[in-house]
Image: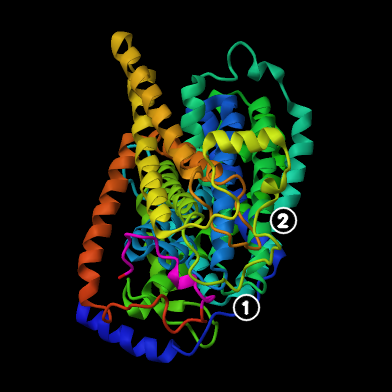
Amino acid sequence: TLCVLHCLGSNLLVLGAAVGLAKVLTTVDLVSLGVGSCVGTGMYVVAGLVAKAMAGPGVILSFIIAALASILSGVCYAEFGVRVPKTTGSAYTYSYVTVGEFVAFFIGWNLILEYLIGTAAGASALSSMFDSLRTRSVPSVRKGEDTYPDLLALFIALLVTVIIALGVRNSVGFNNVLNVVNLVAWIFMIIAGLFFLSAGNWENGNFLPYGWSGVMQGAATCFYAFIGFDIIATTGEEAKNPNTSIPYAITASLVTCLTAYVSVSVILTLMVPYDMIDGSAPLMEMFAVHGFLWGKYIVAVGSIAGLTVSLLGSLFPMPRVIYAMARDGLLFRFLSHVSALTHTPAVACVVSGSFAAILALLVSLRDLIEMMSIGTLLAYTLVSVCVLLLRYQPDEQTDTHQFSSEDGVDGLKHVDDGHYYTLRLRLGMPDASAKPTPATGRTVTRCTLLLFLMSFLLWSTVIFGVEQGAGAGAVFSGLMATMMAGSMVKLLILIIQQPESGRRLAYMAPCVPFIPAAAILVNSYLMLKLSPLTWARFTVWCFIDKSARQLLPTLRRPPRRHVLPRRQPLPPGAGRETLPGLVRS
């Protein structure tokens, strides 16, 4: 079978080698893709699921915390997108160009997991909505204690796969129409819901029925609802002006999604007590509870549009990541074939969509959402690590995407303030004219990796030692956590004492190293708040990752010494940003 796949890959690669992806996406298209991929499942499913089982009305705070984590990661993602704008594959390609193949393969593998599960979750959510409309009469066969394999979800996933494979312009136009319908439904829900509010649903301790622990657990799951900026980053080769479109679209999609989630969560929890919320179709059933059936059916139309566009948003980037990895020889080469008719990675679309359809058939919606969150959080954490590393590496060559600057220092360093100058001296910050060297780059690399590892150790001690401990054990854990926090502060001080790269980009994450460090801390905490079963499934996926790395070298072309061959040329010097001590091949 492997030989057949290898031969098929060679034939398809010859046919599709000269065909590139179509550059047709505007900034509005990117915002529409980002918002659509989030708001559908996030608004129509996640809000009710988290409110009912994890946080109660505190789901509002869960969404705000998850949004904070997403914004921290989003600004890092935006800088990565500007550093390597004319590529596809999102964080996978960025990390390949900057930190090497090993980390890139791990990130890419987790992005595939994220999109695979997101597509399956979208199809499952759509099926649940239809099930609610038909009074739960969708034909199915029992697959577990509480859930059923969904043949309708299987069909939906396959249908959307066909739409995606037909071409970018067609799928994005369909996406934009559905987003307009979803927007109208959201406005209707907010206005109509105002007539059925009951403040008693938040009184007598009902706002935080599961405490702050429930809010944080809910935030970890709600992070799933803010992955839209990831799809934006995968469209570098298909955007007309990625250098400016990607940062703007990421910011706009995050703000729009947070507004939608908070407003809907307020209406939902004030209309229906949290323990009476319907788990499968909460926004539809909140009107049915009050006897407003017309409202239910209007929301049903919006939910069909929202969940469909969310499904499109999850499936749209998956074949592009697979395409990028296959083009680099890290997956079967036939997956990099681009259709001459539709200018899409058609083979990757069909393969990934088929696997997602099978997953939608076999796994419950809640398990899918939690599993997706952990892969997404880890990928975004690694992106923040990479941005922190790259800011302190020596510049070997000028980047064509740089901004010209008269003095090469940022606005903060222009401040002629005595207190700021004194603070710089006390912290040991270098002079503005200092340039990074390989030695200072290695220092930052070591400090960043230690910061990454210690963040997981710190939150493990806090969650399992302080929050769940008692007596002397909890006190000892608290002291250990305090010492680790102090060590992490020292690592940050050591990082800011190193000279920063003078490279100017169209967009740069602010307040480095503090923003990336905060993203690492928040994401690692949210990951550890997910269920043990989710971690077990994720561990299995990582073992598959390891096995794939051992198998694929026997099926791909010889190792390359240059990044991303046969692509549109990267900016001069982009391939030279590999960090000290990390090997590319």
Which quadrant would the C terminus be assigned to in this image?
bottom left
Q: Position of residue 449 (x, y in %)?
A: 36, 46
State which tag comes first along the sequence, 2 or 1.
1
| Count of picture labels | 2
The circle on residue 189 is none
Question: Which residue type does callout 1 highlight?
Answer: Lys
> Mark 2 or mark 1, which is nearer to you?
1
Determine the CA span between mark 2 and mark 1. 26 Å
Q: Position of residue 391 (x, y in %)?
A: 51, 55
State whether residue 66 is above or below residue 79.
above
Q: What is the magenta range?
A: 570-584
Residue drawn at x 39%, y 43% as measured from the top left: 452
Q: Secondary structure at mark 2?
A: helix
Residue that carries the numbered disc 2 in the rendered image: 181
Q: Position of residue 189 (x, y in %)?
A: 73, 40
Q: Nearer the viewer, residue 418 or 295?
A: 418
Q: Position of residue 507 (x, y in %)?
A: 64, 59
State whether residue 450 is above or below residue 396.
above
Q: Is residue 147 visible?
A: no
Q: Is residue 248 visible?
A: yes
The main secondary structure of the magenta stretch is loop
Which quadrant would the N terminus be assigned to in this image?
bottom left
Q: Nearer the viewer, residue 215 or 285?
A: 215
Residue drawn at x 52%, y 45% as measured from the top left: 513
Residue that carries the numbered disc 1 in the rendered image: 23
State whether residue 440 is above or below residue 2.
above
* Residue 480 relative to residue 348: left or right: left
